[in-house]
Every structure is written in structure tokens, then in C-alpha cells.
């Protein structure tokens, strides 16, 4: 548990630092920059997460005595728990970011979503009707709930893949 928490904290801190780097580099200032920032953040965040999960599972495997197996299930649980800790901590940080650090980013997020609807060819009436729902979904509570669910699903799928590669079979026992 200590190992998964440690790597979950590391993963969360790296994600939080990435978010603040995007903020300080100006990727949260305009709709055009925000879309680019989302793409960069998504790719770099995925790399950070995968590296942290692999390191976490390898550390848990190293903690397990060589006489015991560290199969798919144990590997998955180690990766999943790291993901869970990271997701919880990152969501808390994101809510603080939305409410305290940069509350104006919510307007940028709304404008970004409205621009996407406009690019799809929706009429101005349809866009206006959608704006209320979009604004509601960009609030801190819906963002936290959506972020938690989506983050956990994505990291669970990645954990399933990582577990397939980072496991150690049980040692063969000799028959007497």
C-alpha cells in the first residue's frame, strides 16, 4: 500500500506540475491555445502516467519475495491502486485550480466547446441552447465527477495492459 500510494503521489504531482506549466506557458489563456494545450497535456500526461505505473508495479514486484509469484492479478492491483491514488489527488488539485488559481479557465473551456459545436455546423440557436448545459458541466463538481470516472476508466485499461507485461510467474516446485 505504501508503494502504490508513493507512486500515486508522484504521478499526481507530475500531472499537477504539467497543468501548471501549461498555465504559465499561456495555454489556458485563449481558445486556440487551450486546444493545443489539451493535446500536449494529454500526450505528456499519458507518458508520465505510464512511466509511474510501470515503476510502481516493478517496485511492488521487487518487494514480493522471489519465492512467491507476482502474477497478473497482483500486478493489476498494484497498478490500479497507484492509478486510484493519483486520480483522487489530481482531481482535488484540478478543483482547486478551477476555483482558486484560475477560475477564468472555465470560460475558456466553454468557449472551446462552443467553437467545436460551431465547427460541426450547428446553428446559432442550437449552440445557444447547448451553452447552458456546457456551462453547468464545466463547474467544479461535474468536472470532478467526470474527471474521476474518466480518469479511473482510462488508467484501469492501461493498468490491465501493464499487468500483462510486468508480472513474475510463481517459481516451479519440484515434485517429491
Image (cartoon, rainbow, N blue to C red):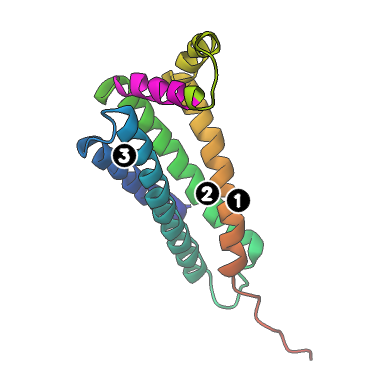
Q: Is residue 85 above or below residue 3?
A: above
Q: Secondary structure at mark 3?
A: helix
Is residue 112 within the magenta segment? yes
Residue in the image at 30% along x and 44% along y: 18
Q: Are marks 3 and 2 in contact (CB under 8 Å)?
A: no
Q: Quadrant of the C terminus?
A: bottom right
Residue 157 - label: 1
Q: Is residue 6 above or below residue 127?
A: below
Q: Nearer the viewer, residue 135 or 173?
A: 135
Bounds of the magenta segment: 104-116
Precedes in sequence: disc 3 or disc 2: 3
Of the two numbered discs 1 and 2 in the rendering, the one whose residue sits closer to the viewer: 1
Q: Disc 3 to disc 2, how far (Cα)? A: 22 Å
Q: Secondary structure at mark 2?
A: helix
**Residue 59 locus on image (x, y percent):** 45, 65
Q: Residue at the right extreme?
A: 176
Q: Secondary structure at mark 1?
A: helix
**Residue 171 locus on image (x, y percent):** 65, 81
Label 2 belongs to which residue?
81
Residue in the image at 32% along x and 24% along y: 105
Amino acid at each position: 500500500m505504501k508503494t502504490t500510494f508513493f507512486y500515486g503521489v508522484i504521478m499526481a504531482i507530475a500531472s499537477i506540475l504539467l497543468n501548471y506549466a501549461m498555465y504559465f506557458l499561456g495555454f489556458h489563456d485563449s481558445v486556440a491555445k487551450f486546444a493545443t494545450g489539451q493535446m500536449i497535456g494529454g500526450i505528456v500526461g499519458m507518458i508520465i502516467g505510464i512511466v509511474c505505473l510501470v515503476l510502481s508495479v516493478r517496485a511492488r514486484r521487487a518487494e514480493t519475495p522471489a519465492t512467491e509469484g507476482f502474477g497478473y492479478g497482483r500486478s493489476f492491483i498494484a497498478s490500479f491502486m497507484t492509478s486510484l491514488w493519483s486520480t483522487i489527488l489530481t482531481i482535488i488539485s484540478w478543483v482547486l485550480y478551477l476555483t482558486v488559481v484560475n477560475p477564468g479557465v472555465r470560460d475558456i473551456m466553454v468557449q472551446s466547446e462552443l467553437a467545436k459545436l460551431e465547427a460541426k455546423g450547428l446553428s446559432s440557436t442550437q449552440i445557444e441552447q447547448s451553452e447552458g448545459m456546457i456551462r453547468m458541466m464545466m463547474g467544479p463538481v461535474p468536472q470532478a465527477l467526470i474527471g474521476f470516472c474518466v480518469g479511473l476508466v482510462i488508467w484501469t485499461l492501461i493498468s490491465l495492459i501493464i499487468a500483462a507485461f510486468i508480472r513474475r510467474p510463481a517459481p516451479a516446485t519440484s515434485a517429491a
